[in-house]
Image: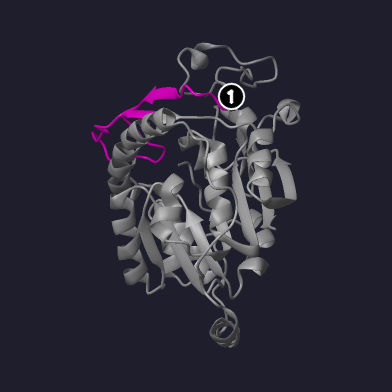
Amino acid sequence: AVVAAAAAVAATSLLAAHRFLSRCRSGCEGSRRNGGGGDGKGINPQDLKEWEQKLEVNRLNWDERVAHHTKPCADFYVKCRRQLEEGGSCIPKIDSQILQPRVQGRSLLHLQCHFGLDTLAWRREGACEVVGLDFSSAAIAKAKELSQMLNIPAEFVVSDVLKADEVLNGRLFDVVFTSVGAICWLPNIKAWAIQVSKRLKRGGIFYIRDGHPMLNALADDDTPGYNARPLDAKGGNDLLLSYPYFETKKPMVFDSETTYTPMEEGKRLQNTRTYEWNHGLGEIIQALIDSGLKILLVKEHKKLDWKFMGSMIKGDDGFYRLPKHQENYCALMYTIMAEKL
């Protein structure tokens, strides 16, 4: 999924570390058993079979990406790893300012964690138990390796997120976290929300920040013919609707030999096909509500972690924005935080 690391958080002082360890020993109960939320009934078995087939194609692609995302040329992943090696964290301030106080001394489950950099970073941010889950066995193997290498305790589990309940065997967490570029790989937002709810303790917090579905519906630099279009009079790319805004049964199909990080010269992906699904903001929010969560925060952002189109401008904070004359035309990201009732 598209993920971007941001500025490092300074290493905690010895006094702060002592206080954190004391709080974890006395206050962190860790993950517990049993759960609530929807039961997932009503899913058509034929739909489930089709999902599994397409998610398997995606898994092959992501298994292959791991090797490229862990190379020295993989820019922001390398930056994040370096920050962890130096004793800091790579959680962007836009997330840590909201979630870090709720993570301190608590258990956290990171869904669709890739090879675990954000998972390990949340441990550095104060979580006293972190579990990362991803469907790529190659990613999880690398995450376990990094956990040992960096001496950051963490647990990593191989599973399709839509089957998390089976693999985690009823364990509950204080916080469930999903990072940028994750849910576009999932065919059904209701099934996903049920898994989120089932993993949370009563009063537990769910948090996601992701690319806005309006952005995901726009043409970008990879859309055939888009770059051949002239810029507008003020130097901006046209904002053209090219993909579904709402969730559709039929996925969007993409074929690409590259990934979103730089690759070594001459290297190309062999498993080029992927399937993606957009989910409208209302669909996401309602799915979370229906699964037993209370929405605490919804925020739409005018900035983005990556350069979605050529005319975007990078700010001093590392985020990309549309040109000034277009900045109010389209939300680029959203943040949702919710509580398990």
Please give left or right for residue 144 compared with residue 174 in the image. Answer: left
- Let me know if residue 89 appears in the view: no
Q: Residue at x 40, y 41 (%)?
A: 261
Please give left or right for residue 341 compared with residue 273 in the image. Answer: right
- In-front residue for pair 146/317: 146
Secondary structure at numbered mark 1: loop
Please give left or right for residue 235 compared with residue 129 in the image. Answer: right
Instruction: Check the picture and name the quadrant holding the C terminus.
Output: bottom right
Q: Is residue 296 above or below residue 327?
A: below
- Let me know if residue 272 appears in the view: yes
Count numbered badges in the picture. Answer: 1
Residue 337 on image: x %, y %: 68, 52
Q: Residue at x 47, y 72 (%)?
A: 87
Q: What are the residue bounds of the magenta stretch?
A: 246-274
Residue 119 on image: x %, y %: 47, 61
Q: What residue does disc 1 label?
A: 217
- In-front residue for pair 101/264: 101
Q: Is residue 272 magenta?
A: yes
- In-front residue for pair 304/297: 297
Q: Is residue 107 magenta?
A: no
Q: Residue at x 69, y 14 (%)?
A: 233
Q: Residue at x 60, y 82 (%)?
A: 27
Residue 190 on image: x %, y %: 57, 39
Q: Quadrant of residue 8?
A: bottom right
**For the stretch drawn in magenta, what is the main secondary structure?**
loop
Q: At label 1, which amino acid type do we have?
A: Ala
